[in-house]
Image: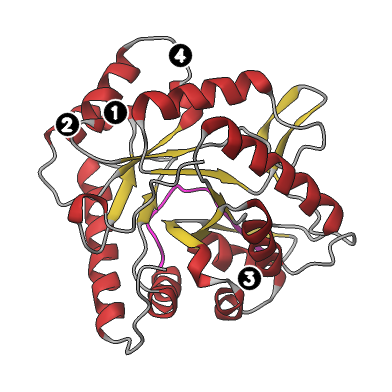
Amino acid sequence: MSNTQSFHPTGVHHPVGIGLKSQHYQEALNADHPLAFFEVHAENYMMQGGNHLRFLEAIGEKFPLSVHGVGMSLGSEEGLSSTHLKKFKSIVDRFQPWLISEHLAWSVNDGTYLNDLLPLPLNETTLSVVVDNVKHMQDTIGRRILIENPSTYVSFKASDIPEPDYLNQLAQKAGCGILLDVNNIYVSAKNHGYDAQTYVNSIEGSQVGEIHLAGHTVKNIDGNELRLDDHGSAVIDDVWGLFEYTVRRFGERPTLIEWDTNVPDFNVLVNEAHKAQSLMRHALQTDGVNHGAA
């Protein structure tokens, strides 16, 4: 299994990228901004031909790409879909992405795809399933992948492993890495009443290969505040603060601005990326610890 991951794509320091949207293809091709990479959702490119693939090939010649899966269903007891896995591998082989990632979630039941990333109870039983599925995916595509922590709204009585420990064990047993979504940590911490910095402190930093940032929305349901990870707005100040804390703790990591609904103009995303670069630079300057390229 090959691991071509590097924390500094094409020599870029403070590497921050944005999600690539079809309405921004031409602007991405013409971009002269210091963007480190573009991320695409694998499932949007699982066709045989067409403009989407042609644009992605052209953009991939100018920028490193990150392929982010949303449909592998790594938590499914029934195992991985061979058809989906074959299509995913074809994207990896064709575009040779710099980073590859998927979610700690399940979305398939008895062969039927559900249009959501559903949470898992965190225990030894599900950990064994996810470890086997991650190993299968990595062995098939020939690459190490990163697993993203979820945003959660309910807790399971069957859960007996804290989420950071679960991710650490998964990385150690499956040989994968961790994609640390700082917004998801913040959302889940607020929903469940725990401390977000304590969560970050519990993560094995050497396994963190990427950071995600996004916006979320706040709903009032029967007098209770619930935060929903909808990727439909700018990153809020508290999440920016948690991002700086994470960088000070773990050092520089590739960072992505996610904005998947209510998608704004291209320059809005670029400005969010510039802000992330600036905050990463500031966090590293104020941190006396030398993290190295863990």
> Residue beneath label 1, please?
23
> Residue beneath label 4, please?
47
User: What is the CA distance from the residue labelled 4 to the residue labelled 2?
Assistant: 21 Å
Q: For the residue labelled by badge 3, is the local secondary structure a helix, a strand or a loop?
A: helix
Assign the magenta stretch its main secondary structure. loop
> What x and y, as percent, mark residue 142?
51, 35
Assess disc 2: are there few (<14), some (14-19) or many (≥20) residues with their C-alpha within 10 Å of its C-alpha.
Answer: some
Residue 90 is tagged as none
Would you say the residues marked 4 and 2 are in contact, meaning their CB atoms lie under 8 Å apart?
A: no
> What x and y, as percent, mark residue 224?
71, 66
Between 113 and 235, the one nearer to me in the picture? 113
| Position above or below: 151 against 109 | below
Taking the view exactly as shown, the residue that stands out farthest to the front is 1
Amino acid under disc 4 = Met
Amino acid under disc 3 = Ala
Amino acid under disc 2 = Leu
Q: Is residue 106 magenta?
A: no
Mark 3 or mark 1, earlier in chain: 1
Residue drawn at 56 percent across, 36 percent down: 70
| Boundaries of the magenta span | 225-236
Mark 4 or mark 2, earlier in chain: 2
Residue 189 is tagged as 3
